[in-house]
Image (cartoon, rainbow, N blue to C red):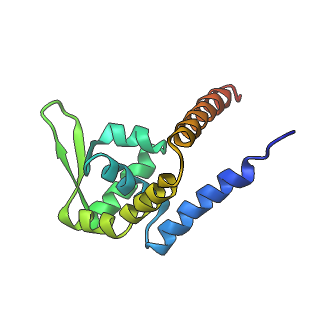
Amino acid sequence: MTTDLGPVFTGIYNTYHEAALRMGQTDTEQLILYILCKHENRIDRNELYKKTGLSRVTVYTAINKLKKRGCLDQVKNADRSTTVFMTEKGVELAENTVSKIIQMEEQVLSGWKASDKRHFAELTERYYAEIKEKVQDIK
């Protein structure tokens, strides 16, 4: 029996995309704010690039748009790295947008048994690792 995961993954992607649109954000802006919320509102810019999985240009452009709106700022560190952080306006924006998504995720998962959560996480991580490895073989 073959399981067609395409519709599931497409559905999940489309659901998050719809949430971003309903909240007046691009997918990239939503993802950046989501990651910042999960990292106490600040993160090293290179780590942010890695966590999004998107191109540096895409993330850099979204950071600049959010900076122009007064939601993000950046600071150069002594080690020459750059920290991206939410301003007060950014925290307020996140509370009205991505924090709602995080709460919805927590509500869904709160109805699951601990063993189901672990199993879901393990299978998802395994799938991701294996598909990522296979994509590297594409020529």
Instruction: Kindly indicate the quadrant of the structure image that contains residue 51.
Output: top left
Residue 67 location, x and y as percent?
27, 61
Q: Is residue 25 above or below residue 117?
A: below
Q: Position of residue 69 (x, y in %)?
A: 28, 68
Q: Residue at x 43, y 73 (%)?
A: 24
- For the point 69% across and 53% down, the residue is 8
Task: Tell me the quarter of the image containing the N terminus.
Answer: top right
- Please determine whether, in this image, residue 59 is positioned above or below residue 16: above
The residue most toward the front is 113
99 or 134: nearer the eye?
A: 99
Residue 63 locus on image (x, y percent): 33, 55
Q: In the image, is 129 to the left or to the right of 88?
A: right
Residue at image location 34% in from the left, 70% down from the top: 96
Q: Is residue 105 above or below residue 117?
A: below
Left or right of residue 21: residue 138: right
Q: Nearer the viewer, residue 30 or 74?
A: 30
